[in-house]
Amino acid sequence: GLGGAVFPMAAILARSDLDRVPELALGHYTHEKSPVGCAAALATLDTIEREDLMTRARTLGATALARMKDMEQRYGIVREARGLGLHLGIELANASGPATDAAERVLYHSLENGLSYKLGAGCVITLCPPLTISDTEMTRALDIVEQGIAAVDG
């Protein structure tokens, strides 16, 4: 995160045409305004820009989503694969509705194989890897997820 995983830090980034109320304060918290946290956030933003990590996220995310869409076609339990950049999701469902038990089994398979993520709504495998993930690591993550899905499909 922006605070280097040490300092609480958040930001809202938008194009100037979307900034409709620049004079409105959105809130203040007791943990804000840490000079060291701000330095960590600036260093993070510099790295994102210098290493062009947003372009990389779009490219790698599109590759990952294409593989997930292939899973959607091959496994009946995959209701939908979706994503934007590196924020990705695979929704599992069966004839009776959300496949929460199957999603949990896929999650535990993943954890046993070194991959951690959260389930959204109990049935959506939610992958949101770091912007610095390598191609090899992303492929391995999707391999683990696909193995789990294959084990619960049909």
Image (cartoon, rainbow, N blue to C red):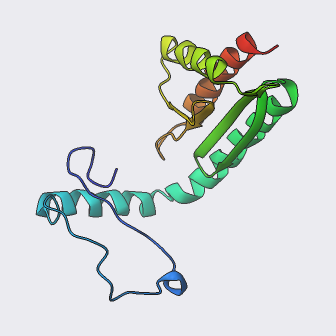
Q: Which residue is at a point 36% across and 62% down the rendered structure image? A: 45
Vertical position of residue 105 compared to residue 14: above or below? above
Q: Which residue is at a point 66% across and 18% down the rendered structure image? A: 102
Q: Position of residue 14 (x, y in %)?
A: 48, 74
Count of numbered tags: 0
Vertical position of residue 53 compared to residue 71: above or below? below
Q: Quadrant for residue 92, please give it.
A: top right
Q: Which residue is at a point 47% across and 83% down the rendered structure image? A: 19
Vertical position of residue 3 compared to residue 90: above or below? below
Q: Position of residue 20 (x, y in %)?
A: 47, 87
Q: Position of residue 47 (x, y in %)?
A: 38, 57
Residue extending farthest to the right is 73
Q: Position of residue 91 (x, y in %)?
A: 69, 35
Position of 82 with respect to 72 (left or right) is left
Position of 6 with respect to 56 (left or right) is left
Q: Is residue 96 visible?
A: yes
Q: Quadrant for residue 66, please give it.
A: top right
Please state, as top left, top right, bottom left or bottom right, where the C terminus lies in the image: top right
Q: Quadrant for residue 144, please give it.
A: top right
Vertical position of residue 114 compared to residue 90: above or below? above
Nearer to the camera, 111 or 53: 111
Nearer to the camera, 10 or 119: 119
Q: Is residue 67 visible?
A: no
